[in-house]
Image (spheres, rainbow, N blue to C red):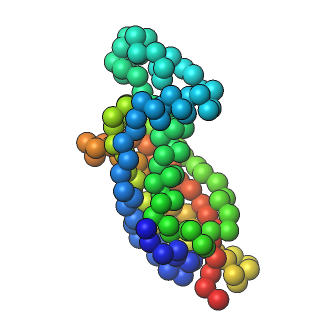
Amino acid sequence: MMNSMYYEDFEVGQRFLTSSRTITETDIINFVGLSGISNPLFIDEEYAKKSIHKSRIAPGPLTFSIAMGLFTRIGLFEESVLAFLGMDRMRLMVPVKPGDTIKVDIEITDKKETKKPDRGVLKEIYIVKNQRDETVMTYEMAHMVKRKQ
C-alpha cells in the first residue's frame, strides 16, 4: 500500500499497477445474490455452455467492483480524496470467468486546478487485464482530491 498522494503529487501520464486477484465461484454467487443480477450466464452452467462464452461468466459490475477494490488497496487517495466525480466510457472486451485473475493499470490522463485552492481534479483511465494480459475492461473516472497546504 502506498501513502496517500495529493493533487501536486500526480503527473499526467503517471501510471500505477495494482496487485492481482482471482475471481472465484463464491464471488459470483455472492454478487448475484446481493445485486439481484441473476442472468443465467452467471448462475446456470448448462445454459452458459450453450452460449458464445461456453461457460459461466462474471457479471461486468462484479469485475468493476473488484477492480475498484484493487485500486483502493494501493491507497493513492486514502486520505486525499474529496469526491468521486463520475465515470465515463466503460467498455467490456473479454468476459471474466471463474478462476480468472485480474489486475488494474491506472494512468493519470488529466489534472486541473479548481477555483478553490485546497483542491484539484484528476482524471484517470483504468485498464483491467486478466492473467493472459488481455484487456477485459476499460473505464475513465474523475476524482476531486486535496491539495497540499
| Image quarter hosting the N terminus | bottom left
Image x and y of residue 147, in percent = 62, 81
Q: Quadrant of residue 54?
A: top left
79 is higher (above) or lower (below) than 147? above
Residue most toward the bottom?
149
Asked if residue 91 shows in the view, the reply is no
Which quarter of the picture shows residue 6? bottom right
On the image, the x and y values in percent for residue 143 come to: 61, 64
- Quarter of the image containing the C terminus? bottom right
Q: Residue at x 28, y 44 (%)?
A: 131
Instruction: Give left or right: position of 53 versus 91.
Output: left
Q: Residue furthest left?
A: 132
| Residue 39 visible in the shown view | yes
> Which percent across, then down, holds residue 119?
67, 77
Work out which residue is located at the far right of the displayed protein and give it: 116
From the viewer's side, name the closer residue of 92 and 130.
130
Residue situated in front as seen by the camera: 145 or 31:
31
Residue found at x 40% / y 65%? 16
Name the residue at 43% across, 60% down. 106
